[in-house]
Image: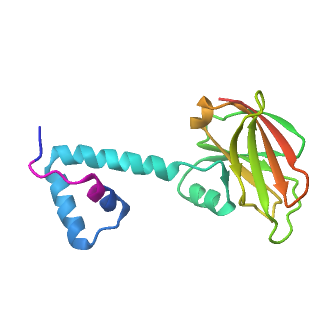
Amino acid sequence: MSCASPLAWETLVDWWAGDLDEAAVAAVEEHVLGCDVCTVVASRVASTAEALRTMVPPVVGAEHLEALARAGVRIMENPIAPGQTCDFHFPRNADLAVHVLGGLVLGAGARVEVTLRSLATGHVFGHVEDAPVDTRRGAVYLACQRDYAQLDHDLVAEVRVGKDPPAQYTILHHF
């Protein structure tokens, strides 16, 4: 099976993203509907784009979480206080777990840094210099996806507000 004039990957990406004008959209759709080869490629583009769209950075803002919830992502919150160790079991009925690192005093314009370390080795595997915060709740949101199961499960999240000593949250993950 082959295609005499295959559509470029970039064209399919632009089509899927909605970045083409009406005439180009019509041409791509007509071609894809009549071409099994390009239909398969278009499906790969859609799968890749969907995977990227649902990826969540380790530290997220409230607006991002609200948008994910509106899109149907099942989010489970796990509140943790500074100094607490949490034995966390990832729930089967959740797409995303959000560790709510609370108990922070967040003044207007406070600069917040988040460092993620392996509990076992101390190795830093994530650092956010200007982390998004929820000033209303006095919290930073640490996202945890099932895909993270292959990473070091047990971590210490250090949250530094301004020049204050960092608050520490220990999370022992079970997937």
> Would residue 35 be found to the left or right of residue 102 on screen?
left
Confirm whether the magenta stretch covers residue 11.
Answer: yes
Q: Residue drawn at (75%, 38%), measured in percent from left and top? A: 117
Q: Looking at this view, is 72 or 145 the one in front?
A: 145
Return the residue found at the far left.
4
Q: Residue drawn at (51%, 50%), measured in percent from left and top? A: 54
- Residue 56: x and y in percent read 58, 50
Q: Looking at this view, is 63 or 12 the one in front?
A: 12
Q: Residue drawn at (75%, 61%), measured in percent from left and top? A: 133
- Residue 145: x and y in percent read 61, 41
Q: Say above or below: 110 vs 96.
A: below
Which of the image's four quarters has the C terminus?
A: top right
Q: Looking at this view, is 9 or 28 the one in front?
A: 9
- Residue 8: x and y in percent read 23, 54
The number of numbered badges drawn on the structure is 0
Please name the colour scheme applied to the rendered image.
rainbow
Q: Looking at this view, is 146 or 57 the one in front?
A: 57
Q: Which residues are magenta?
A: 4-12
Q: Quadrant of residue 163?
A: bottom right
